[in-house]
Image (spheres, grey):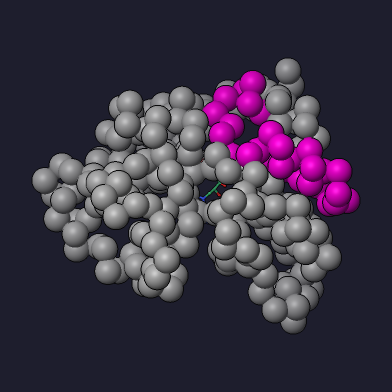
Amino acid sequence: MSFHFGLPSAELLARVKAWGAKIIASATTIDEALRLEAHGVDAIIAQGLEAGGHRGMSLVDDLSTQVGTFALVPQIVQRVRVPVMASGGIAGARGVAAALALGAVGVQVGTAYLLCPEATTGAVHRAALKSEVARHTAITNLFTGRPARGIVSRLMREPGPISDAPPAFPFAAAAIAPLCARAESQGSGDFSPLWCGQNASGCRAIPAAQLTRELAAGIAG
Ligand SMILES: Cc1cc2nc3c(=O)[nH]c(=O)nc-3n(C[C@H](O)[C@H](O)[C@H](O)COP(=O)(O)O)c2cc1C
């Protein structure tokens, strides 16, 4: 599996499709969804503003263009012919059912899996996800140079979460790594990227397969 921000060249897309691979890409706005469809992607993930981690913003940098899941999914469904998956803030079977009711054919869930034993989430990050601090998240570009949502930490609070001159992706991560490691060795998440969406209520330390079955109950219901 390969992750890429934005669209690769038309030649590369054509080569990958010639292998028989299906291409699924994230859109955070209607314009991004239309562009992805025009370039032949097979399915689109409509990633709402609530989503944890990196944002699939590929056309714009302006965060004011970003739309919540409940508003984004039906508008993208209305405008494209390829299947749409909903992403951002979905944390349980009811969220899955709501996404399907909005016209999505499936969902992409990230945050809810972060406490599963299979996840590589570190101890400091796990502790933050289990605590009330997970209720306050923001989008920041300080950790990698690209906008991503995480729990508000000291690093995000003091200079503010958005820098107008971040190192290009992914070089900021290397610059911050020693500070992050030192703080984490003392049990502090002050300088850690604590990726988390706006709805951490689904985070439980249960096997990923069990969580998936619980989420899938929203498809039948
Ligand atoms: C720890 C973590 C890392 C992520 N990393 C990426 C990434 O590298 N690229 C990307 O497009 N999305 C990334 N995401 C976003 C997910 O693909 C997905 O859109 C998001 O988790 C869905 O919203 P939710 O977190 O509210 O479930 C990440 C999410 C999390 C929680």
Horizontal and vertical percent position of residue 85:
71, 43
Outermost residue, left direction? 186
In this view, the residue in front, 153 or 162, is: 162
* Residue appearing at x 83%, y 65% in the figure: 38
134 is higher (above) or lower (below) than 144: above
In this view, the residue in front, 126 or 180, is: 180
Outermost residue, bottom direction? 11
Q: Quick one: quadrant of the N terminus?
A: bottom right
Task: Tell me how many marks there are.
Answer: 0
Horizontal and vertical percent position of residue 157:
30, 46
The reply to whether the magenta stretch includes residue 70 is: yes
Horizontal and vertical percent position of residue 118:
40, 41
Q: Quadrant of residue 187?
A: top left
* Residue appearing at x 80%, y 35% in the figure: 103
Left or right: 76 in relation to 8: right
* Residue appearing at x 40%, y 30% in the figure: 135
**Which portion, as a residue range, is magenta?**
68-96
Q: Quick one: quadrant of the C terminus?
A: top right
The reply to whether the magenta stretch includes residue 7 is: no
Horizontal and vertical percent position of residue 138:
43, 44
204 is higher (above) or lower (below) than 117: above
Q: Quadrant of residue 78?
A: top right
In this view, the residue in front, 1 or 61, is: 61
Residue 106 visible in image: no
Residue 58 visible in image: yes
Left or right: 6 in relation to 160: right
